[in-house]
Amino acid sequence: MKDKQPVRKKKPLVKPPQSKKVRFSIWYLLLAFIALYMFESYLTRQQIEKIPYSEFKKDLRAGKVVVCDVGDQKIQGFLAAKDSTEKDSRKVVMPDTTFWGIGFETIRVEDKDLVSEMEAAGVKFAGKIQSNWLRDLLLIWILPIAVLFVIWGFVMRRIGPQGGLMSIGKSKAKIYVEDKTKTTFADVAGIDEAVEELSEVVEFLKHPDRFRALGGNIPKGVLLLGAPGTGKTLLARAVAGEAKVPFFSLSGSDFVEMFVGVGAARVRDLFQQANSQAPCIVFIDELDALGKARGINPWGAHDEREQTLNQLLVEMDGFDANKGVIIMGATNRPEILDLALLRPGRFDRQIVVDRPDIKGREAILQVHARGKKMADGVDLKVVAARTPGFVGADLANIINEAALLAARQGKKAIEISDLEEAIDRVVAGLERKSRVLNQREKEIVAYHESGHAIVAESVPEVDPVHRVSIIPRGVAALGYTLQLPTEDRYLMSRKELVSRMKVLLGGRVAEKTVFDEISTGAQNDLEKVTDIARSMVTEYGMSEKLGPISLKRRGQTFLGQDMSSGYEASEETQREIDCEIRKLIREAEEAVQSILTKKRGVLDCLAKQLLEKEVIEGDELREILKSGSNENAGKV
């Protein structure tokens, strides 16, 4: 056996101390020139006396001036001194003479007799070109350049390291490290199905080895679909907060700029940053701004957005999902996205973030009510029942508006009345107390809203009336009749649609019945009635004459506007569609006319109550209808 030799530990290499590099600065050069100028001025400075020009002429006539140099602006020379004892005198040595003199300097004045006088006095004089090259170099060249450098440095510091043309191709993504992403699934409510789907993504980011051991691949991209305000961005933040990974957040519009090629460069830079920070989440909000279907540019020119989208598709194909980079997108317009973006291997998992139901709304209200003082009698379940179709952003706005109202009135807690007023503000707008109606207009509005309310309580299968008001709100609403559903509905029958049409026509028919004329207040009602009737005929197949057929509109979308010109049907069929729509509306109007004619007394009573109180709640409305029905039964 070989003898074991001791193992020598390698000493760490000690790097020799490096001398500090002196950075060049314009200030060093400027200080050097100033020092040189001062040194030159000190060496060339002479012991001279500055005298006025008049005294110089006096000394010239007296024969005291021995020698002088005449320059463009100054005259310098020596005055004769008796000996070395005279003040400021010094020995002057010249090629042909030596004498004791006192140096002088004066400002030259335009004097045509100067030369003749100096010749007469026997003064040795000569012309002198004054050279100020060092001063000119300093003042004309060095100092302006230094000022420009100072201004340039100030501008670059204000722009910062991320600004300027040099960084225009850099990604604008905001990076939130794991410590700053405080949002978790505990802050998300009302969308339990979406949370459950995204939990798989969180598990992969937390325990990637568990999936890699079985050869499983996590989806490269997750697309969140839903209406605005449903919580898509909140969900993406919650995934990053649960997984405790970096979170890249940016919008689809952050890629495209006026410069060609910038969008593609930013996409490349984004994926390079994401790979360096893996595992992480890249969230692209408003994906439709970037991922719109290609080939629909109406101008037929080069589209920078398409090049950016192409680069995004290439990058999503090229990176490895098992590295831990998850691409998440959010949009509320999935129908306009490019199909290549939605295929498996890119955004291959689509999660719908739908509007919450009544239980979901209650859970969302409880989340937003955290940290806010609620009165004892506040039941959030009642508020959730009053807000059908509301999304998370709407519910957060209601809680915030109620808190502001309570604080404005000096209350110590948020009461149910504050929440009711906040809902009315969101649904109908702010009260317009400054909009004063005359008595005639108030009567028309009162009968109009009374007609809506009476028909809503008289026809079957419609939502009950919660409140009737003739207080102007919002931009154009002079009054409103608020109906609240008793439960969430996802399907509607033909009877329900016809009943909705009758309720909408109630205001117009009431005006015609009482005043024998029609006002412009029913404009919005007629639009909604026409839309319902058209959908029944062309989309739902609820026309007896046309039968079960769905007719799509011709045309296309141009610059975000619907350019449809008609239906995909013959002219005869289109004429039949118009006849069926008119027939449905006419039948509904006749039914409403019959209802209000029978309940004319109740209509007058309710309109009178509205003129006095301006607001009538649903229970009070039903009491009025009940008492009116009993009176009519007694008369019969």
Image (cartoon, helix red, strand yellow):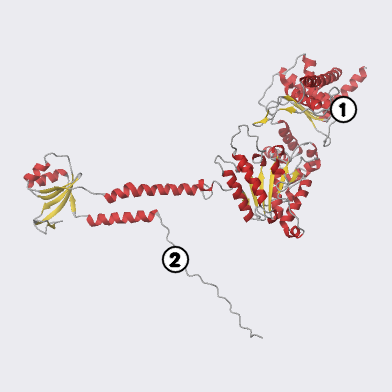
Q: Position of residue 480 (x, y in %)?
A: 75, 27
Is 592 or 441 nearer to us in this picture?
A: 592
Amino acid at pointer 1: Pro
Q: Position of residue 66 (x, y in %)?
A: 10, 51
Is 408 rendered above or below residue 370?
above
Q: Specify few, some or many for label 2: CA neighbours under 10 Å numbering under 14, 14-19, or 20 or more.
A: few
Q: Position of residue 580 (x, y in %)?
A: 81, 21
Q: Position of residue 63 (x, y in %)?
A: 7, 48
Residue at the (47%, 46%) spot, across then down:
155
In the rendered view of the protein, which quadrant contains the C terminus?
top right
| Residue 256, image quadrant | top right
Is 359 or 332 nearer to us in this picture?
A: 332
Task: Report the number of discs.
Answer: 2
Is 562 rendered above or below residue 71?
above
Cβ–Cβ below 8 Å for labels 2 and 1? no
What secondary structure is marked by label 2? loop
Is 295 rendered above or below residue 76?
above
What secondary structure is marked by label 1? loop
The answer, for residue 282, to whether it is visible in the render is no
Residue beneath disc 1: 460
| Residue 116, image quadrant | top left
Cα distance between the residues tagged 2 and 1: 92 Å
Residue beneath disc 2: 19
Amino acid at pointer 2: Ser
Mark 2 or mark 1: which is in front?
A: 2
Of labels 2 and 1, earlier in sequence is 2
Q: Specify few, some or many for label 1: CA neighbours under 10 Å numbering under 14, 14-19, or 20 or more.
A: some
